Every structure is written in structure tokens, then in C-alpha cells.
Amino acid sequence: MNLDFAFMSWSVVSSFIVKGLIFSVQLTLIAMLGGVVLGTLLALARLSGRKWLVIPAAAYVNTLRSIPLVMVILWFFLLIPMLIGRPMGAELSAIITFTVFEAAYYSEIMRAGIQSVPSGQAQAGYAVGMSYAQCMQLIVLPQAFRNMLPVLLTQTIVLFQDTSLVYAIGAYDLLKGFELAGKSFNRPVETYLLAAVVYFVICFSLSMLVRRLQLKIQIVR
């Protein structure tokens, strides 16, 4: 088999690849922000000690962590339009799905981060008259975010890799851009190889940055 990458030029990249890369990055950032916010609320609910909060939050996290992401993507894409009575685009469906799904994973990270903060600090906050919400907002969560920042970013890198699964519902992501370029020039093998290289370069570079950040946080401690 002869590989020929001569067709790959800037015009091909700008016509096919850039659009998909932009959506993949947008999906990653939106799902990360939404997932962290929702995941933090789920973590606080599980640590509240109140059964009416603990049980639903635990059920949410454990259920989504036990289901393959591609299945959740298909569920949301097929079922939500039936529930709301109108079609929903693949991109919007992907954003909602990833935010809801990743929240379960960010929740476990945040819960571990909150538990890593010495309980004496929270008790000191209660001693000076702080409420539970104030104590979490001003004392516990800032330290938890710092402790868990490398893990949160690592999960975000995994999230970026998982965005390729929106291919299943036809969303125009990075992988879709490479696929369309391959079909247009009848070079599917080359474009899939290039897609793998691009994903590797992006994720490996981000992993190195996370590693450097982790070392800096350890020095600060």
C-alpha cells in the first residue's frame, strides 16, 4: 500500500479540518465548565449527609459512570427530540450529553478534592460563625480546586479525546473533518493516520503542560 500525503495542503486544512477542530475545542471547554459546576454540586450533595440529597446524587453518578459514553450520546440524540417534540441538532445534543456525562466524573474528582482538605479548617470556619455554604465557598472549595487541578485537567484531556465519539451522530468534529477530507480526495487511510497524529500531538502536549503544573503545585505546597 502506497501512502500519499501530497493532497494535504493549507486549503484542505482550512476547508475541512479547522471547522471540526473549532467545534471539538468548543465542546471540550463547554462540557468542562458545565461538568465542573454540575459535578461540584453533585459532590456537595453527596457529602452533605442528607439522604434526600445523597441518594439521588449517588444514583446519578454511579449510573452514568456505568454506561458507555457512545450509548449516552445516542440516547440523548434520539430521545430528547421525542420528549421535547422537535428535532435537535447533533452539535447541541453533543454539548448537552457531554456536560451531563462528564459531570459524573468531575463529581468524583471534586469529592476527593473536598475530602483532601483537613476537616479542622471547616470546623474552624463553623467556630467563627460561618454557614456550611460560606465555609465551602471561602475555605474548602478553593483548596479543593487547587489540589485537584491536575486531575481535573487530565480528565479534560480525556474529554477532548472522547469528543471524537460525536461522529456517531454526525456532528462535525475534528475526526469528521478528516473523514470528509479523506472522502473528497479518496485518501481515507492517510487522513485517519493524520487524525491520529493530530490527536496525539494535542493530547501529549497538554499532558506535558499538566505535568509541569502538577510539579509547580507540589513546590507551592
Image (tube, rainbow, N blue to C red):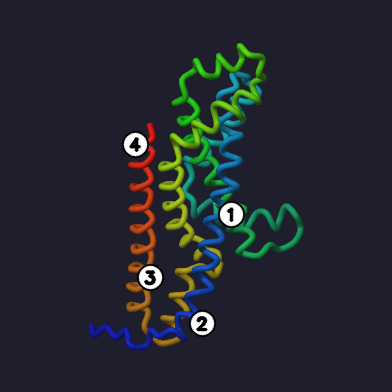
Q: Quadrant of residue 175?
A: bottom left
Q: Amino acid at mark 2?
A: Ser
Describe the element under mark 1 as helix, strand or loop: helix
Describe the element under mark 4 as helix, strand or loop: helix
Q: Quadrant of residue 5?
A: bottom left
For the residues bearing labels 1 and 4, Cβ distance under 8 angstroms: no
Q: Quadrant of residue 187?
A: bottom left
Residue at the spot of label 1: 30
Marked residue nearer the N-terminal end (1 or 4):
1
Residue at the spot of label 2: 15
Q: Amino acid at mark 4?
A: Ile
- Estimate the x, y position of residue 220 in percent, counting from the top left: 38, 35
Q: Amino acid at mark 3?
A: Ala
- What's the distance in space between the residues labelled 1 and 4, CA to CA? 30 Å
The relative height of residue 136 versus residue 13 in the rendered view (above or below) is: above
Circle 4 residues within 10 Å: few <14, some 14–19, many ≥20: few
In the rendered image, the residue lying farthest to the top is: 127
Tag nearer the camera, 1 or 3: 1
Describe the element under mark 3 as helix, strand or loop: helix
For the residues bearing labels 2 and 3, Cβ distance under 8 angstroms: no
Tag nearer the camera, 1 or 4: 4
Q: Amino acid at mark 1?
A: Ile
Residue at the spot of label 3: 195
Q: Residue at 47% x, 40% y: name it.
A: 66
Residue at the spot of label 4: 219
The relative height of residue 96 versus residue 123 in the rendered view (above or below) is: below
